[in-house]
Amino acid sequence: MTKEEWKEYNKKRKDYLKQYHIKNKKKRNEYNVEYRIKNNEKVNEYTKNYKLKNPHLQRHYEAVRRTRIKNSTKNIKLVKEFYKNCPEGYEVDHIIPLSKGGLHSVENLQYLTPKENRIKKDRIYA
């Protein structure tokens, strides 16, 4: 295979994979959720090792998240109370995710089961 043929092959392959990922986004997300549930320990170990190997990225992500929360919190006492009253077996979720411009306020919080929360991710449902 010549160099030009190889470049053309790689370009077609990348285009095909991009289209595949776009067409099968929901299916891939469902698979990822199932995989994470079945292989929770393995995923946690990988995440832990990644954070140890890339502390600069972790600090950056945490700083960005803290800033976003700090700038969007209306009444911190009500938010803390909401978290404290979370029923067992549920997690607190932002209805409109912080990453999508949602506020860290009681009006934007809800209780979801861990499975529902993993499926929702950072989506906004009407």
Image (spheres, rainbow, N blue to C red):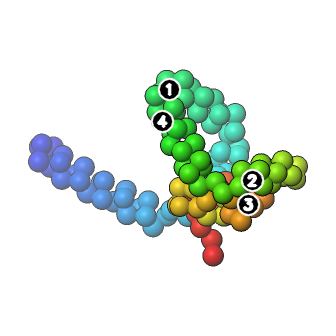
Residue 9 in percent (x, y) is at 22, 52
| Residue 67 visible at all | yes
Give SS at disc 3.
helix
| Disc 4 residue type (three-letter) | His
Residue at figure coordinates x 73%, y 60% from the top left: 106
Give SS at disc 4.
helix
Which residue is the site of mark 3?
A: 106
User: Based on the displayed image, in which of its 4 quarters is residue 123 positioned?
Assistant: bottom right
- Asked if the residues shown at circle 2 and circle 3 are in contact, with their CB atoms under 8 angstroms apart, the answer is yes
Which residue is the site of mark 2?
A: 79
In the picture, the quarter occupied by the C terminus is bottom right
| Disc 2 residue type (three-letter) | Val
Give SS at disc 2.
helix
> Dot 3, how many residues are within 10 Å of its Cα: few (below 14), some (14-19), or many (20+)?
some
- Asked if the residues shown at circle 4 and circle 2 are in contact, with their CB atoms under 8 angstroms apart, the answer is no
Marked residue nearer the N-terminal end (3 or 1): 1
Disc 2 to disc 3, how far (Cα)?
6 Å
Marked residue nearer the N-terminal end (4 or 2): 4
